[in-house]
Each structure stands twice: as C-alpha cells, then as structure tokens.
Image (tube, coloured by chain):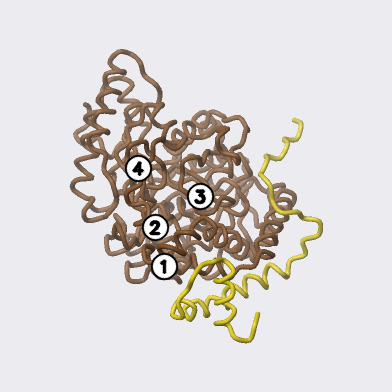
Chain colours: A yellow, B brown
Amino acid sequence: MEDDPRETVRRLAALASVPLSEERIAALVPALLFVQAGLAALASVDYREAEPAGRFRPRPKAPP
Amino acid sequence: MTTADPVPLSIAEAANLIRRKKLSPVELTEACLQRIGRLDARLRTFITVTREEALAAAQQAASAIAHSDYKGSLHGIPLALKDLFDTAGVRTTAGSKIMADRVPAEDAEVTARLKAAGAVILGKLNMHEFAYGATGVNPHYGATANPWDPTRISGGSSSGSGAAVGAGMALGALGTDTGGSVRIPSALCGITGLKPTYGRVSRRGVVPLSWALDHVGPMARSAADAALLLGVIAGHDPGDETSSEEPVPDYAKLLEERGLKGLRVGVPREYFFDNLDAEVAAAVRGAISTLEELGSQVSEVSLPHIDEAPAAVNAIMLPEALAYHRRWLAERPQDYGDDVRGRLEMGLLYPAVSYIEAQRLRSLIVEEWRESVFDQVDLLAVPTTPITAPSLEEADLQATLALVRFTNPFNLLGVPAVSVPCGLTSGGLPIGLQLVGRWFEEGTVLGAAHAYQQATDWHKRAPPL
C-alpha cells in the first residue's frame, strides 16, 4: 500500500471505473485497515498444492 | 375446517388436513392474508402481497383436490418468497430502489417448482437491500421488525422470511444465504432455516449477491416442514451451472430413519464459543446435552483454518458483489442505501490476488475438513449467532459482523447447516442452535434437527403478537 491511503483508494476506484467523491474516498480509508488485516490472514496460509475452488462434489461413500 | 385458527398449523399438519379435505386451501390462505393484514404494517414483512393471485391459486388447489388431483404436501399451502426470487408478472425488487419497477417475465426455477407442487404464493418478502447485509434494515421498504420484540431487528438478509414465518403469516418461506442470511433470521425469529449444500438448490432467476457463496434455502417452523420444502426445490437444474446432479433423496422419509442415536456430534474447541452472549452459550450447551441424552456421541473437535475463513468469505463476497453492481454503482450511487453503497465501495479495496487466495483456501479447507473433521464426526453443533436480536438502533456494522461470525464459514465450505430454536433469553428472545453436516447430507442434518424437535418444544413457541 502507498503512504497516502487516500491516494490508494482513489487509484483503486479509478482502475475499476467507479468515480468516488473526496468525501467517499475519505470514508473508505478506515476500511483499508480491515481489508489489510484480512489480506494478511490469507497471506499467512500455506496453500501447498491447492488450486482455486471448483464445484463441490460429495465424497464417495465408503463400501459397506 | 377442523380448527378455529389454521395459521398456527405446521405445513405437515395443514397438508394432512388438506389431503383429507378437512381444511380448504382457500380458508387457510384467507387466514394467512388476514394475519398479514393485521401485522404487516407493524412488522414491515412484505414488499408485495399478491392477494388476488394467492386466492386464485388457493381456489385452483381446492378445486383440484376436490377432484382427487392431490399433488403432494405443498398443495394448497400458503408460502412466501424473499423478494430476490423472480416471479413472472410480479415485481421483484431485490429490496432495492434500483430494481423497484422490475417485473420478470419468468419465474425463478424454485418459484416454478413450488407452483408446480401446488403451493400458494402469498407475496414477496422484505429483505436487506440486494441481500447485502445481516440486519434487514432497509432504507427503501422499512426495517423488518422482530415478531418477538418489534423494537428489535429480525435479522437478515432474509428478514421478511424470518418474520413472516415467525409471526405465522405464512407456513413457510424461501430465503437466500450468502453469509448466513437464512440461518440468522431463523435464529433471531425462533424458526427453523436450512442452508443446503452449495449446488443442491437452483439459483436460476435469483438476483445474485456472490455467485461462489449464494445458496437458496427453506425457512419454516420445524425441520419436518423444511424437509418438505427442500424435497420440492432441490435437484438438478441444467440452467444453473453450479447445480449438482447428485440425486435427491426422500427427505421426509430420511427424517424418520435418521435420528440422533449413534450419531457422532462434534463441538469445536475453538472459535464458536469465544466472545458470545452468556445466555446464548448456556442455551446451546444445554441443547448439546440434549443431543447426547438422545443417543448421540458428543466429542470435541478442531477445525482447520477456521480463523481464516471469514477473511476468505470477505475476499470472495465483496469483489463478486462489486462486479455485479459496478455499473449501477458508477451511474446511480445515490440509489443505494448508505450501508450497501459503502460495502460495495469496499469491494474496490480487494486485489485480485486475495480473491484467488480465498478460492485456494476454499479448496484447502474443504479437503482438510473432509479428512480431519467429517471423518471424526457426522455433525457439528454450534451456536447460530453469538448474540440475540439487536435493537433497531444497535443494528450497525458491528452487529452485522457479530451476526455473521458463526454462519459465514459454512458458506465458504458449502456444507449443509440448519438453525433450530433452542431456547429463549430471560428477555424472551429466541436463540438458535446450528447443526452442520457433510456435503449433500441434508437428510442427516434435518434428521438430527427433527429428533431434537421431537424431544423439545422451542420450535412450537410463538411470539406474543
């Protein structure tokens, strides 16, 4: 993240083509901390060979 | 008619009377409409009441049954739908201003299945705007009030579904659940609500919130009623890419076959009993003791990656919701309520890598729970919510985060989870017990819930309306 959190929010919104007023940008700045905490949690996981999820299928039943 | 007030009947009881021609669907529908007329202004439960269509459907059901053309347990039963399910010719607002005038040409798959089973649709239920919140406080259609205490929220996002069934306005309802939106209002309103396995019930014709996490589920007074509803709405739909081809068992039959005897019930060592209301903890612990008395083997279990699960849910839900809403958010931001607009804007902050990591975590957690949790136990028993219904004034972001804490991990996993009433606080507010099973084992989950409800009467308690 950049040093200026407002600039970070402004650039992310511009990249997504969602215009935000300065007031809305300021309101989003506190949310950055919440998001960063979540991203840190995800970054801490050892994913080993896991690929992104597909559809869920039932586990094959063990023979009786 | 054999009963002075048919509204307190369960679906199973009403179906039995209707099948034997002891109760007319018209009389039952009129009783529900009367109750809606008496309570709806106070509880803000419905967005649209389809009175004429409901009476016509009830009349049609009565006529068919009179000619011995009985379709089954939902024939002539008055139900209601969260206003997220498309209904041909009847507006479907998603609880929003943006879709306020949207009238779909076709029914959602589940709407069509209910109609084909002969159900009577009473109308479209209030909800959190675009299903994006857990409180049911809606700036466009009003905050749905809790039937147990109208100064409190009913929970969301299927707020009207919870309140309508809790208040006896409908015998059952459908809701959707992306982070707990069936189970939370079920817990807060003292009813039974099931989030089935991901892919078990079609989502075609349902306004999406997050494609990877959205589930459709039944809400009713009992597990037996939820089983009847699930039996009709479950099953493959080629029009929904995530729909499973797994065969649909006879849930009502499984209910009788699968009790609690010998079932291995796991109580998590971590996460689910941290930071929760003392009365909730006591009620859920008491319910788990009852499960043990009824023949299950209770043991402690550890849940891999449970602490990271909510972060993964957010990293999937927020970008997916933003992707669906991006154009409206850019062009009509003022038409969203403040909380939903803020949540959509928050989706801008998630980088692509976190979305992929969250999907990788989803794979990892599914495999690890298959191997190390659901090999040891058949069910998990946990609280549905850590708190009971907050007041309307307390229904803020903190309340939302608390309400979803025990439900949203199971959206990531895609496993079936039911909330059943298991107590009342000293202030008279309902408490929910959540039972969670293996993928596609709704029969086991509902069977355990049914066995619990055969031994207790919390699901039969009615709010003082």
Residue, far right: A49
Does label 4 or label 1 sit earlier along the sequence?
Answer: 4
Disc 4 + disc 2, Cβ < 8 Å: no
Q: Name the spot of residue B83 as percent of width and height, x first.
A: 37, 47
Q: Mark 4 points at which residue?
A: B103
**Secondary structure type for disc 4:** loop
* Spot occupied by residue B314 in the image (x, y as percentages of width and height): 57, 63
The disc, 3 or 2, on the residue closer to the chain's N-terminal end is: 2
Lower sequence index among marks 4 and 3 = 4
Could you tell which of marks 1 and 2 lies nearer the N-terminus?
2
Q: Which residue lies furthest to the top in this view?
A: B67
Dividing the picture into quarters, in which one does residue B318 lie?
A: bottom right
- Identify the secondary structure beneath mark 3: helix
Quarter residue B302 falls in: bottom right
Please name the residue that numbered disc 3 is placed on. B290
Distance from label 1 to label 2 (Cα)? 9 Å
Q: Which of the two discs, 4 and 1, sits closer to the camera? A: 4
- Chain letter of mark 1 equals B
Q: Name the residue under label 2.
A: B129
- Residue B120 visible here: yes
Residue B261 visible in this rendered orientation of the protein = no
Q: Which of marks 4 and 2 is in front?
A: 4
The amino acid on which the numbered mark 2 sits, given as a three-letter code, is Glu
Q: Estimate the x, y position of residue B132 in percent, counting from the top left.
A: 45, 59
What kind of residue is marked 4? Val
Circles 1, 2 touching at the beta carbon (< 8 Å): yes
- Give the Cα separation between the discs numbered 4 and 2: 17 Å
Q: Which amino acid does label 3 sit on?
A: Thr
Residue at image x 41%, y 67%? B339
